[in-house]
Image (tube, rainbow, N blue to C red):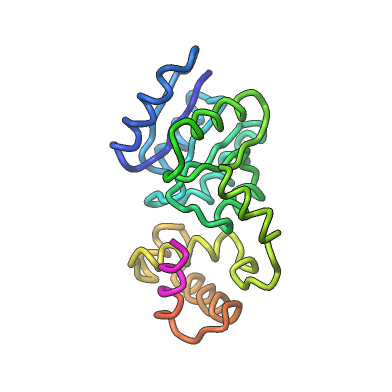
Amino acid sequence: MKILLVDDHIVVREGVRRLLSGMNGVELHEASTGEEALAMFREIRPELVLLDLNLTGIGGLELLRRLLTEDEKVRVVVFSMHAEPIYAARALRLGARGYVSKSAGADELVTAVKKVAEGGRYVEREIAGELAFTQLSAEDPLQQLTMREIEILRLLGEGNSLTEIAQAIGVAYKTVANTCSIIKSKLGVERTADLIRVSMEMK
C-alpha cells in the first residue's frame, strides 16, 4: 500500500516513518509542502494520504479539497497539532476518512491508518467524544466559518500579514481583506487583533 505523508517537520516525518515501518506492505513517500504533495500525488497515486494541516503555501484543508478533486476515492487521515473539534469537523466534512492529533498515542495513529486503509473511518477517541458532545452546536460562532475563513484565521494567528496570506493561498489582497471583514462580522469582533487572539485561542 502506497502512503503519502505530508508534513513540513522532518522530525515528525522520521517518527511516522519508523512507526509505519512495522506495517506489512507499506511503501511510504514523503512531501513537506502542499505543492510538493500535489505533484507527488499525481505521480505515485497513493491509496492513503497522511496529512498535516499546518503547511506553508497550500494549507492542509485546501490540499485535502484538491486531493479529493483529483481522486475522490483517495483515503485521507489528517494528522494535526490541532485537537479542537472544529478542525476535525471541517476535515471530515471535506472528505477526510480519519483525524488524529499529534498529542495522541502512537498506537492510535497506527489504528487510524489501518482502519482507514481497510475502508473504514477513525477519529481520535478524545476528539470523537468532544464532537459527539458539542454536536457542532450552531451557538458556537466558529462553526459558521467556511474552510477558507478558517484557513485565513489560522494564518493570521501564525503572524502572517494580509499580503502574505494572499500569496500563500493564491488570491488577491482585497479578497483576504474582505474575508477578514466577513469573519469579524460572524465572530462579533471589530479589529484584526481580535481575530488574531481568537486564532491563538483555537490552538
Which sits in the foreground, 81 or 145? 81
- Name the foreground residue: 54 vs 180: 54
Residue 160, image x, y percentages = 34, 66
Q: Check the image and name the residue furthest to the bottom.
A: 190
- Say which quarter of the image contains residue 148: bottom right
Residue at 54% over, 73% down: 179
Q: Nearer the viewer, residue 92 or 73?
A: 92
Taking the spot 64% from the left edge, 54% from the top edge, the residue there is 131
Residue 91 sits above or below residue 49 on the image: below
Q: Which residue sits at x=67%, y=30%?
A: 120
Q: Residue 164 vs residue 23: left or right?
A: left
Q: Is residue 131 left or right of residue 63?
A: right
Q: Is residue 46 left or right of residue 118?
A: left
Give the main secondary structure, helix, strand or loop, of the magenta stretch: helix
Figure disc tally: 0
Taking the spot 46% from the left edge, 75% from the top edge, the residue there is 195
Relative image position of residue 95 (x, y in whole percent) = 65, 43
Q: Where is residue 67 in the image (x, y as percent from the top left)?
A: 56, 39
Quadrant in the picture for the C terminus: bottom left
**Which residues lie in the magenta part?**
196-203
On whether residue 88 falls in the magenta region, the answer is: no
Q: Which residue lies furthest to the top in this view?
A: 25
